[in-house]
């Protein structure tokens, strides 16, 4: 029974990652169509969320020490 909860947790994380990635890709395409600079999608909401998700383990490790 515990494997079912683990599977549901993994599915929720994968679904959230898929939605965030699709949102970022939409922002990237929109930015390129407008001719914005290369960094414009990274300062949008999905870009900042992705950067935060990547940096969060490093930030947590830094604060724990």
Image: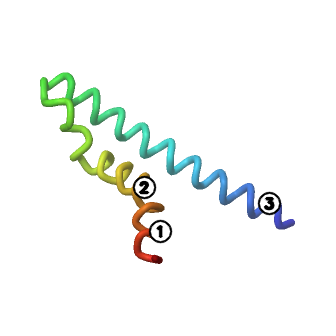
Q: Residue 2 at what x, y percent from top left?
A: 82, 67
Q: Quick one: SS at disc 1?
A: helix
Q: Quick one: SS at disc 3?
A: helix
Q: How many marks?
A: 3
Q: Residue 45 at what x, y percent from top left?
A: 27, 51
As drawn, the label of residue 61 is 1
Q: Residue 61 at what x, y percent from top left?
A: 47, 68
Q: Earlier in the sequence, mark 3 or mark 1?
A: 3
Q: Earlier in the sequence, mark 2 or mark 3?
A: 3
The vertical placement of 60 against 21, above or below, is below
Front label number (1 vs 2): 1
Mark 2 surroundings within 10 Å by alpha-carbon count, few (fewer than 14), some (14 through 19), many (20 or more): few
Image quadrant assignment for residue 34: top left
Front label number (2 vs 3): 2
Q: Quick one: SS at disc 2?
A: helix
As drawn, the label of residue 4 is 3
Closer to us: 59 or 25: 59
Q: Residue at x 13, y 29 (%)?
A: 36
As drawn, the label of residue 53 is 2
Q: Earlier in the sequence, mark 1 or mark 2?
A: 2
Image quadrant assignment for residue 10: bottom right
């Amino acid at each position: 029974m515990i494997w079912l909860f683990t599977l549901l947790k993994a599915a929720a994380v994968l679904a959230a990652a898929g939605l965030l990635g699709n949102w970022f890709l939409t922002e990237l395409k929109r930015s390129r169509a407008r001719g914005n600079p290369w960094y414009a999608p990274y300062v949008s909401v999905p870009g900042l969320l992705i950067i935060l998700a990547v940096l969060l383990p490093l930030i947590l490790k830094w604060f724990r020490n």
